[in-house]
């Protein structure tokens, strides 16, 4: 190595605050893992060759492939990368050019899928513009190789390389980064020092479990992937990286990016709280989540079921409520049309049946068994002919068994106000759930039970689930106070403020004798 080359290298390392002996990094060993470096590039003809040269030789020796995905650049990025491969005779450098621009997120998706298909173990994301230091590539993949983490994120906010401001990050970007990171940490219950850099590494076994099909192709893809990794309980580690701002062209619109990040977090929160089903987070949407607040239908039903009972949960869904009541030493048999509930192990037995046929599809498997409690939680409104199911329930109730029913209250104040302004809009869930066939008031619900051979012995109205609407925890002090106030008001105006009609019914003996 010539004296001038050594001086240039020391100068570059000084600018990036990288120790001069970093090339001898002993973390580079792949330990038998198949490592891929994914370089995403767009109009990077002036910087990409420099990025290649800055990758330490011991990293080149330990990675299986360095792959460039040129996102339909308008310059000669692809040609430069291809010439570099030929000139330097680097067999494990591969270069692809997208026929059309896929966007920052779309380009990553394509690259990750390529490495997954090739059965790689680890991927490190590197940008072709030189903003992130290739000199410390091994710092990103080493924690994954050793099993410390499933994902490793570089952070410019950690002080090890002097921090972001000293590295040249403009003050407005620093402040914006801090504000967004604080908001994301607070919203997601995380504690990262930085959400907003693109220098990161992933265990591809973890990445394979992330559904990217509906994720954005824009720059906030990096935010969505953090959200998904955190939601799915993958381990995340941060490592310090140097900050560098050169004369590279920035294609990110800062204000639009900030808005997109904010909206992405809010869309995630709304999805997991079952307020709305956004496609990028659709796998986390629960159609009927457990309502954890006091005076909710689930709060009432846990008390009504009690303990040590033999329970038939008709229309059990994924089994979330069964999971609750099974903790009280109840034996739960579930019936639903779904093929395989997520919490199937919470059932003593699960039977697949189409409830439009009543219990006809389940009767053989029930084998004449009688139950202490038969639950019809939010199911009658989904049936075109609920009378069939109600009549069949007589045959599975024990002599002193109880039928526990809940239906939404179509006379709720929110529906009345909507009608007052001429609005009737179906929703993903709630009173106007788009899958509802029938609508009930507390009077029509009682009439339905009575005309099908039941005597209603107890009637309650649940409160409106304001914590789900606002996306806040039921334990939030404000929600606790509002919930108690709403419960008092609902007691005095049940038909107006009640959210669900909850009824306990017994079979009429004269009906059974017919």
Image (cartoon, rainbow, N blue to C red):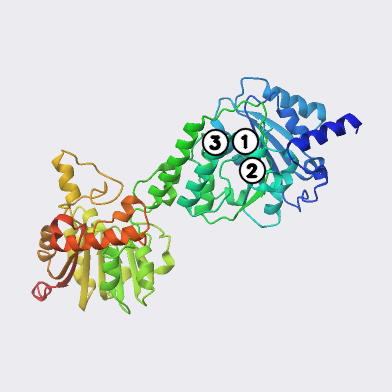
Q: Quadrant of residue 460?
A: bottom left
Whether residue 363 is visible here, answered yes or no, is no
Q: Quadrant of the C terminus?
A: bottom left
Q: Disc 1 designates what residue?
A: 169
In space, the residues marked 2 and 1 are separated at their CA atoms by 9 Å
Q: Earlier in the sequence, mark 3 or mark 1?
A: 3
Task: Name the residue nearer the viewer: 154 or 342.
Answer: 154
Task: Name the residue nearer the viewer: 118 or 50.
Answer: 50
Whether residue 301 is visible here, answered yes or no, is yes
Q: Earlier in the sequence, mark 2 or mark 1?
A: 2
Q: In the image, what residue occupies the spot 23% across and 51% down?
A: 431
Q: Is residue 357 left or right of residue 262?
A: left
Question: Pointers 2 and 1 in contact (CB under 8 A)?
Answer: yes
Nearest to the eye among marks 2 and 1: give it.
1
Q: Secondary structure at mark 2?
A: loop
Q: In the image, what residue occupies the spot 34% across and 70% down?
A: 333
Q: Quadrant of the N terminus?
A: top right
Q: Give the label on residue 105, or none.
A: 3
Q: Earlier in the sequence, mark 3 or mark 2?
A: 3
Q: Position of residue 54 (x, y in %)?
A: 77, 35
Q: In the image, what residue occupies the spot 30% across and 73% down?
A: 311
Q: Secondary structure at mark 3?
A: helix
Q: In the image, what residue occupies the spot 15% across and 42% down?
A: 419
Q: Position of residue 141 (x, y in %)?
A: 69, 48
Q: Quadrant of residue 378?
A: bottom left
Q: Disc 2 designates what residue?
A: 156
Above or below 141: residue 332: below
Above or below 376: residue 80: above
Q: Secondary structure at mark 1?
A: loop
């Amino acid at each position: 190595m010539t004296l001038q080359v050594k001086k240039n290298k020391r100068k570059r390392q000084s600018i990036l605050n990288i120790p001069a002996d970093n090339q001898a990094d002993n973390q580079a060993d792949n330990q038998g893992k198949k490592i891929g470096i994914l370089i995403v590039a767009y109009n990077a003809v002036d910087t990409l060759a420099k990025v290649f040269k800055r990758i330490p030789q011991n990293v080149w020796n330990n990675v299986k492939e360095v792959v460039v995905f040129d996102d339909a650049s308008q310059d000669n990025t692809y040609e430069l990368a291809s010439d570099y491969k030929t000139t330097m005779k680097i067999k494990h450098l591969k270069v692809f050019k997208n026929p059309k621009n896929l966007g920052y997120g779309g380009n990553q998706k394509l690259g990750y899928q390529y490495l997954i298909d090739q059965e790689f173990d680890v991927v490190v994301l590197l940008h072709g513009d030189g903003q992130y230091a290739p000199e410390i590539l091994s710092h990103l993949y080493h924690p994954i190789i050793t099993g410390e983490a499933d994902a490793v994120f570089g952070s410019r906010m950690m002080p090890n390389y002097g921090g972001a401001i000293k590295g040249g990050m403009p003050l407005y970007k620093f402040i914006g980064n801090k504000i967004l990171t604080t908001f994301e940490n607070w919203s997601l219950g995380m504690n990262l020092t930085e959400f907003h850099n693109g220098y990161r590494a992933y265990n591809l076994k973890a990445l394979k479990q992330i559904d990217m099909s509906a994720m954005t192709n824009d720059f906030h893809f990096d935010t969505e992937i953090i959200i998904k990794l955190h939601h799915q309980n993958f381990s995340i580690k941060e490592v310090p990286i140097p900050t560098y701002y050169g004369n590279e062209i920035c294609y990110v619109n800062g204000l639009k990016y900030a808005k997109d990040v904010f909206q992405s977090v809010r869309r995630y929160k709304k999805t997991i709280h079952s307020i709305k089903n956004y496609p990028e987070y659709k796998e986390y949407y629960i159609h009927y989540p457990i309502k954890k607040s006091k005076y909710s239908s689930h709060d009432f039903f846990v008390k009504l079921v009690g303990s040590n009972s033999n329970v038939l949960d008709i229309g059990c869904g994924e089994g979330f409520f069964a999971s609750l009541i099974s903790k009280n030493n109840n034996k739960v048999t579930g019936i639903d049309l779904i093929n395989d509930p997520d919490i199937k192990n919470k059932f003593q037995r699960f039977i697949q049946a189409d409830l439009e046929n009543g219990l006809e599809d389940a009767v053989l498997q029930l084998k004449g068994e009688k139950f202490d409690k038969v639950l019809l939680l939010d199911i009658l409104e989904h049936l075109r002919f609920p009378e069939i199911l109600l009549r069949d329930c007589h045959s599975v109730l024990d002599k002193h068994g109880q039928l526990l029913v809940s239906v939404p209250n179509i006379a709720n104040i929110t529906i009345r106000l909507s009608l007052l302004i001429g609005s009737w809009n179906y929703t993903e869930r709630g009173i106007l759930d788009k899958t509802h066939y029938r609508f009930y008031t507390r009077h029509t619900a009682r009439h339905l039970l009575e005309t099908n051979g039941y005597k209603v012995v107890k009637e309650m109205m649940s409160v409106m689930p304001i914590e789900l609407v606002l996306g806040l925890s039921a334990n939030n002090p404000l929600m606790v106070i509002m919930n108690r106030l709403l419960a008092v008001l609902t007691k005095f105006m049940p038909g107006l403020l009640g959210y669900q009609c909850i009824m306990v019914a017994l079979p009429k003996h004269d009906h059974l004798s017919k």
